[in-house]
Amino acid sequence: MQMGKHILYLLLGSNLGEKKKQMDEVMDLIPEMIGPVTKQSSFYETEPWGFSSEEFFLNRALQILTYLSPEEVIQKIDQIEKTFGRERSGSCYSSRTMDIDILFYDDLVLDHDTLKIPHPRMQDRRFVLVPLDEIAHELIHPVFRKTIGELLRDCTDTGDVRKFK
């Protein structure tokens, strides 16, 4: 992988604790640990996906410039999540204080056991596509060769996603 700046897209999510405050604190950590945030979506309230909880999520998509490799980015994400008490417990979905997912890293396609880029299920999730569409409507998914706007239009997920007031 070549050195230099890379365009990284992340999705932040939280449905436990003081969600907005935690998101603001993460927004302070990301520039110093990963790189400057160049675009950020509005906050969205979204219903839990893949499990039941009365607590809705707060989600936000970010575009970041980084010099880090994907492996270094995931290490930094793990550090940030642990700062907020995140414990990864296998593959089941659950409530969490902070969840940060890599959506895209340039147009890289990576399929490792521990890291998959682009995010393998983003096209099925409105809570990812709606905030991402706000900041990257014309971005082309390197696997599906569709824009984010097209993926959102074609998404069959009916989960509630609304701008946070």
Image (tube, grey):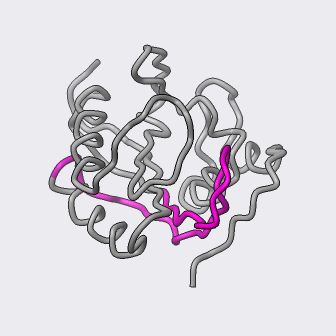
Question: Going by the image, does 39 lie left or right of 163?
Answer: left
Q: Residue at x 34, y 50 (%)?
A: 64
Q: Nearer the viewer, residue 46 or 33?
A: 46
Question: Going by the image, does 40 lie left or right of 157?
Answer: left
Quarter where residue 154 is shown:
top right
Residue 45 % position (x, y): 60, 69
Q: Is residue 81 above or below residue 114?
A: below
Q: Residue at x 41, y 74 (%)?
A: 20
Quarter where residue 72 is shown:
top left
Q: Residue at x 44, y 14 (%)?
A: 113
Residue 51 % position (x, y): 66, 47
Quarter where residue 106 is shown:
top left
Question: Going by the image, does 48 lie left or right of 3?
Answer: right
Residue 107 % position (x, y): 48, 29
Q: Residue furthest left?
A: 32
> What's the magenta region?
33-61
Q: Is 89 in the magenta?
A: no
Q: Nearer the viewer, residue 26 or 146?
A: 26
Q: Residue furthest bottom?
A: 165
Q: Residue at x 74, y 49 (%)?
A: 152
Q: Is residue 100 above or below residue 25?
A: above
Q: Is 48 in the magenta?
A: yes
